[in-house]
Image (cartoon, rainbow, N blue to C red):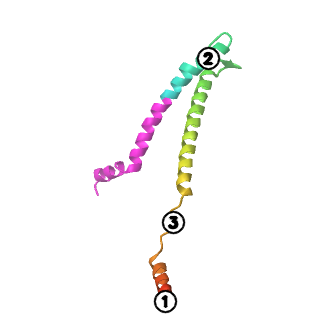
Amino acid sequence: MGFVKEFKEFAMKGNVMDLAVGVIIGAAFGKIVTSLVEDLIMPVVNHLIPGGTWQTITFHGLKIGHFAGTVLDFLIVALSVFLMVKGLNSLKKEEAAAPAAPAETTTEKLLTEIRDSLKK
């Protein structure tokens, strides 16, 4: 099998396409969360910090303000992913909670018919 044909089969598999869509949506979601933190949350924090902005916060000479914003970004993304996975898992549990009635196998059906005919 040629390299190009093999690569085409690999790239067209559903899992690869799902992964690509997930990466693209994840990157866009990351930008939204960064904007949320930098444009909405941290300006509120700026009013609570005397004499500066959150980006200028230092601790023993270390500039930790930008790092704190990045950590907040991560925590929001992690919480969002956790809630999404938890929701999906609860949907799967509901599907598993209602099992279908087991189908009668051919052997069992034949044995039941033989028993019933012998009773007659």
| Left or right: 51, with 28 as reference point | right
The residue closer to the viewer here, 106 or 70, is 106
Q: Position of residue 52 (x, y in %)?
A: 64, 11
Residue reaching furthest front? Answer: 120
Relative to 82, residue 36 above or below: above
Under mark 3, the amino acid is Ala
Q: Position of residue 92 (x, y in %)?
A: 53, 51
Residue reaching furthest right? Answer: 60
| Left or right: 117, with 6 as reference point | right
Q: Position of residue 18 (x, y in %)?
A: 41, 45
Q: Are marks 3 and 1 in contact (CB under 8 Å)?
A: no
Residue shown at 67% from the left, 15% from the top: 48
In terms of secondary structure, what is the magenta stretch mainly?
helix
The residue closer to the viewer here, 40 or 109, is 109
Under mark 1, the amino acid is Lys
Which circle marks residue 44 in the picture?
2
Decide which of tag 3 and tag 1 comes sooner along the chain: 3
- The quadrant of the rendering that contains the N terminus is bottom left
Region in magenta: 1-30
Q: Which residue is mark 3?
A: 101
